[in-house]
Amino acid sequence: MNKRNTSNSTPVLGRRSFLIASAGTVAWLATGGLSGIAQAAAPHALPPIPYAENALEPFITADTIGFHYGKHHKGYVDNLNKLVERTEYADLSLEKIITGTAGRADKTAIFNNAAQIWNHTFYWKSMRPKGGGEPPALLKQKIEASFGSVDACKKEIAGAAVSQFGSGWAWLVLDGDKLKVVKTANADVPLTTGMKPLLTVDVWEHAYYLDYQNRRADYVNTVLDKLINWEFALQNAS
Ligand code: MN3
């Protein structure tokens, strides 16, 4: 726990406080907390992860989450806060920074760090302990209307995740009233092209290399079968 508490801006929480914070996060998520996170203006804080670091074991280990959340995700937050200090972006929400810098060659570093904060916060919520299984009925209907079956939808997500060359993300999105699967490279996020993200899978190597080495397909299929949070997708689709 201590390794992530190296910054002055990060409150030092003991294990007990962390668990209480996590329980609070669950309640807060249930009341639509995503937009709450996304609207928070600079200085940006590392959003809480909605479960304990070992909660996704044995499929994703505490070691992976510890580095991924405590080093990579936190690193993007620290970088963004430095990059926007005393700029026109200093007081903007994360989403406004992302949409305001997307596609601008002179703002690449700000876009990349802001989008990676958003993407990772969304990724943690896209999984849950004892996830996978059957989607809730309302989502299942939408999935069947767009893909034919839940299995076909999962195959399409896995296909996008495995075929993304290099680092990036696979997404289930709502495009108009139709569900689609898309993939993005590096920090890119479907928000900037008007699609509404429902779920994501991180396919940067840091997401799976400690646990799966080069077996990206095994990692992706395990996430889809054992961890994917269909309830979160349904909340986002509503
Ligand atoms: Mn990552």
Image (cartoon, helix red, strand yellow):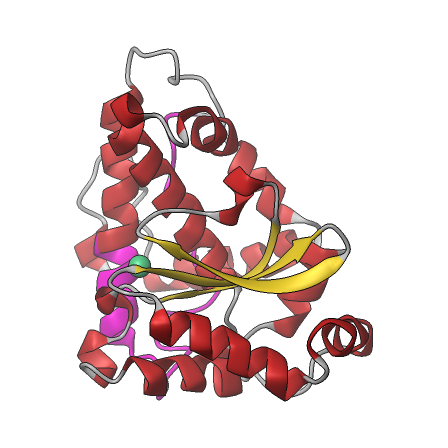
Which quarter of the figure is the C terminus placed in? bottom right
Q: Is residue 107 left or right of residue 138?
A: left
Q: Position of residue 113 (x, y in %)?
A: 30, 39
Magenta stretch holds residue 62? yes
Instruction: Tell me where the magenta segment starts and ends, as one range.
Output: 42-71
Magenta residues, dominant SS class: loop
Q: Left or right of 19: which side holds 186?
A: left
Give the residue drawn at x 31%, y 39%: 112
Instruction: Name the residue located 32 percent from the left edge and 12 percent from the top edge.
Output: 87
Is residue 162 inside the magenta stretch? no
Residue 206 sits in quarter:
bottom left
Residue 103 is situated, as x and y percent measured from the top left of the image, at: 38, 31
Displayed quadrant of residue 62:
bottom left
Figure check: 21 above or below 117: below
Q: Is residue 231 left or right of residue 226?
A: right
Q: Is residue 156 above or below residue 45?
A: below
Q: Quadrant of ligand 1?
A: bottom left
